[in-house]
Amino acid sequence: MSTAVVKRAGAPAGRSGHGLARHLKRYWQLWAMVLPATAFVLVFAYVPMYGIQLAFREFDFTAGLTGGRFVGLKYFQQFFDSPMFATLMRNTVLISITTLVLGFIAPIILALLINQLVRSRIKRWVQTITYLPHFISVVVIVGMLQVFLSPSDGLLTRLLASIGISGTNFLGDTGSFVPVYVLSDIWQHAGWNSIIYLAALAGVNTQLYEAARIDGANRWQLIRHVDIPALVPTMIILLILNMGNVLNTGFEKVFLMQNTLNLPISEVISTYTYKIGILSSQFSYSTAIGLFNTLINFTFLVLANRIAKRVSDTSLW
Amino acid sequence: MNTCTRAPAFSRRTMLRSLAAATAVTAAGGTLAACSSGSGSGGSNQLRILVLKHPLTKPMAQMAWTKQLEDVAGIPIAWEEVSADWDQKKSTMLAAGDVPDLIVGTGAISDSDLATYGTLFEDLSDDLDAIPNVKEMLAAKPELTALATQSSGAIYAVPGYKRFWPPTVQHQYINRQWLDALGLEMPTTWDELYDVLVAFKEGDPTGTGAKVIPMDWSPVGTTGFGYFQSVLLLGSTGLPLSSGGGQGYFLQDGKVSNFLIDERYRDVMVFLSKCYAAGLISAEVLTQDYSAYQSAARGPGDGVATVGFTWGWTRSDRFGPEIYEQYEAMPVLAQKAGQTTPVAWSYDGLGENFPANQIVVSASTPNKEAALKVLNAFYDREMSLQVLFGDIGPNIEKVDESTYKVLPAEDGTDPSTWKWTSTLADNGPMWIRDDITVELPTDLQEAIDETVPLQPAIDNMDLEKDVYPTQFIKMTAEDISAMALVNTTMLNTTQTKFADWITNGGVEEQWDDYLATVKASGIEGNIAKMQQYYDDYMASKQ
Amino acid sequence: MTTTSLSSGRSRRARRPHSRRRRWSSGERLFDLGVLLACALVVFATLYPIYFVLIASISDSGAVATGQVVLLPKRLSLFGYEQILGDARIWTGYRNTIVYTAVGTALNLAVTLPAAFALSRREFRPRRPLMLFFAFTMFFSGGLIPTYLLYKDLGLLDNWLVFILPSAVNVYNLIIARSFFENSLPEELYEAATLDGADYFRFFGTIALPLSKAIISVIGLYYLVQHWNDFFTGLIFVRDYAKQPLQIVLRDILLSNQAFSGGAGGGGGSGGAYAQRYADQIKYGVIVVSTLPVIVVYPFLQKYFEKGVLIGAVKG
């Protein structure tokens, strides 16, 4: 932090009259390093962005992507006025926020836990095993949920009944949809997501432990005062990035888990967009909904970034 | 911190420069990429045929009949084989206007696609002389002309004729062995069915004490109904269904309506909810996937059955080779004893025997001549048979010039698997001639036999006035999308209520509120539109 | 079991001269026990479903779907694997995926790491607008159709480069790598290097990279898995089956079950005994076949996580 301030203060060249030449002379290597990435993003992400205007036009195949009649905010209005709007928003936010919060905390706890394992062989095994479920495809995960949670003979249903939780059809009950969705998500991805934290923990200066030890810190205090602070920058960055997902839910999993019983809670923006967009070619409408989704997400990202910058000096930009 | 948020002028200029550089880099990359794509688009030395096939169907190149097609075409055929996620692939491909020379697959390109993207495809109405088989087929089967022709008069997609399919693909089964074991009669009404199911549940019909599922049906989707589902009970009330129920629209006496807002549907829901409350319906009926649903009916093994009453395509398909003989195909039940309303069933034969949109040709193909030759060859007499059942030789025996026999698999694979792994089967374009004799595979024969008990109910239906001719009617793109939007909203309510009523009851108390909600979604507008289209269609047939 | 591993762990630790945990109390032991128990729980919860995938892949599908397969496979059969491995497309798919993954990941790292380093330099002031430029694309995209048209113009359709070029930079990974460089490379190192006359290239190549093996392996793994699991590119942009990656082939096999259910009537009851008896077997077998190689890679990368400790040493 302090060095950064020094650097900034020590580089007045940028603001002086003939700064460009000096800037380039000094930083051309950095430019060269960032340029290829910039070029790829420019071409593959920015060039197609003209497609966004489809949200404001009538999709007319014969007229081309940019040739449809301009209809302004018609499709946004249509979405806001839709009888589905309130339900979709509620469900989407509920599912994504729950996933976001719990899915954010779980890998941190897991990483701290694994990091506490003293024997490196056990540590590696635990790490490898918890990382495995990440590779099971969604189709199979949902298939396994079907088998494990089947109301009549599912393994988990029986297990839960033995500890007094019974009488619920976990696959159909509107009250259990979110817990099942989120917990299975955590089960699947916590190990994978903890990798980044484990890498951060591996970077902790061992002398910090020694010093804390000498001060008489116990294991719990080591975690609190050494490990967790080491994770904070990564946590903040990931949290900011996650905040940009408030309106995103995994389409495929929700879609596959959907049935007529849980539909009141499981219809989310992405499944609705799929139903109207892909299945009935309403490109303008689905683009508009997508854009609305994006705008909300982006707003949250910008807010999160601003707050993070204020309180911790870690930020995306 | 402030200095950083103010972007200095030089950096903006630098960025512009870097943009220019980036564009140059990619331009180079682009040419590079273009050079390395050998067989990319535009190769006119081969015919690119996209084919929608079943995932377990063997590669096209391994079917002998594809060689015959290649000979006809005169140039090599490059098969682009698609199985999974076709909807996603298609919607991008069509919207981007990028289609191969031919697209093969029943319904691969839907009527709604044609309404929006029709111009991407060759209008075949003026090419009929180049495709004599199709021309002949349209003359022999006048229904197909309506099926193929858009409201503009253009023919973008060629339909087919499959001839052998029974009028319904949905059959109703009960476990005869259980009835006998418990000394019960075959039920003929809902009340009798209810009593029988209670007896199944409580009387240990298997004699093993095994848990039984008195009634079960296939998973109901959130976007509509399909085959082998409990809405088939609507037939008992005299409400005629077609093709499984779909989004609820039906035709009776020339009037379009939707059963989701029909009192007879309410009756069915009351009955189902009564059965569910009595524990007669599988606890998983609303949450299981297709795989679990099929497995349950096959029993735990050792010749023991699990399911008492259900619907399916054929007994051997539904219950598996071990126990299917315990079951018997049933006639349609009456809603009440002594009811005067004639019962009905689901008429699926139109869609099965007259499959629409089997093949399309790109309007911009550089090989139009070869494309038309291939299209024509698909509708050849023997080719059609081979496309449906497999190669002459391993799959079909040619007895004489007009007699064929579909052979069973040498290794004992069941007939339907044998067919689907060997060839395109029902996905392929075909015209099965009426003047040839074919000894059918056992599964198809079984389905035909099991339709017999349902035949009287089907005979009660007037094909002109009780079956909505969905595939013969060509709607405009605007109507299709407006109606789809209404249906998406409407089904969100109705499918939820369907599940809710079955598990929790309350149909009668909630019915009026439900009607109001469903009507608010605009269902009546859809009904009116469909009525208009139907009336126009009927008028045009005169 | 826990006690033995605990005690052996202790003796091992005791042998280490400079162990960071030197004093032992009953509280510490309790803590270790708690950690082990918690891990055992996590491992069991994770391992059982994996084990289930394995036994389900060799059991009769009906038994799997009706919950009869719990601890041991039932009505054992290798049909699923015969079917999967006997499918010639699988091998082409494997080859393609390995090529796409190897080339793709190499390009990813070559593009991402330098960019992340440049963006991590606090004195490089354009980094803020540049970060915004990158982050923006995580949210706003033009949609599939314009993307398709762009690829068409660039000749990327049905071209293997479509698996490599468009995904060259993943902004998420770029941000993570940048934040690592920013937080783990001590500023003093850079100053010392500058005094020795190093420029950015040299600093990056000889000091930053060697010190960042942990993050390189993490980012590398992220990219590798991203390529390995990518089916969407093949789905939308490639029609030539010979160029399809493994995931598309597997997805075709995987979804065959669903295809049957949807098309039951359409195909005249195409369900068929076959699909039923083996559908799940194939489904679970596919997971095993497609995951094995990625699992094998992990332990190789894992060891680099421990190398990260170096940074601390230098810093101290």
Image (cartoon, rainbow, N blue to C red):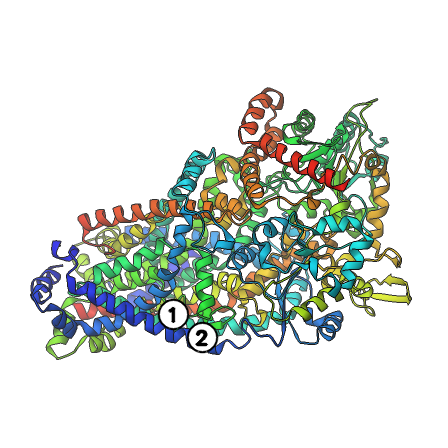
Image quarter hosting the N terminus of chain C: bottom left
Check disc 2 and give the amino acid type: Ala
- Left or right: C7 as drawn, with respect to B5: right
Q: CA distance from mark 2 to mark 1?
A: 32 Å
Q: Residues within 10 Å of mark 1 (few under 14, many from 20)?
A: some
Residue for badge 2: B33
Displayed quadrant of residue C274: bottom right
Image mark for residue C301 = 1
Residue B393 visible in the shown view = yes
Image quarter hosting the C terminus of chain C: bottom left
Residue B230 visible in the shown view = no
Q: Residue at x 74, y 29 (%)?
A: B198
Against B490, is A26 above or below? Answer: below
The reply to whether discs 2 and 1 touch (Cβ–Cβ < 8 Å) is: no
The secondary element bearing badge 1 is classed as: helix
The secondary element bearing badge 2 is classed as: helix
Check disc 1 and give the amino acid type: Leu
- Left or right: B142 as drawn, with respect to C134: right
Displayed quadrant of residue C181: bottom left
Where does the image place residue A76, in percent across and percent down from the top left? 40, 41
Q: Residues within 10 Å of mark 2 (few under 14, many from 20)?
A: many
Image mark for residue B515 = none
Displayed quadrant of residue B405: bottom right
Where does the image place residue B416, in percent across and percent down from the top left? 76, 57
The chain identifier of the residue carrying mark 1 reads: C
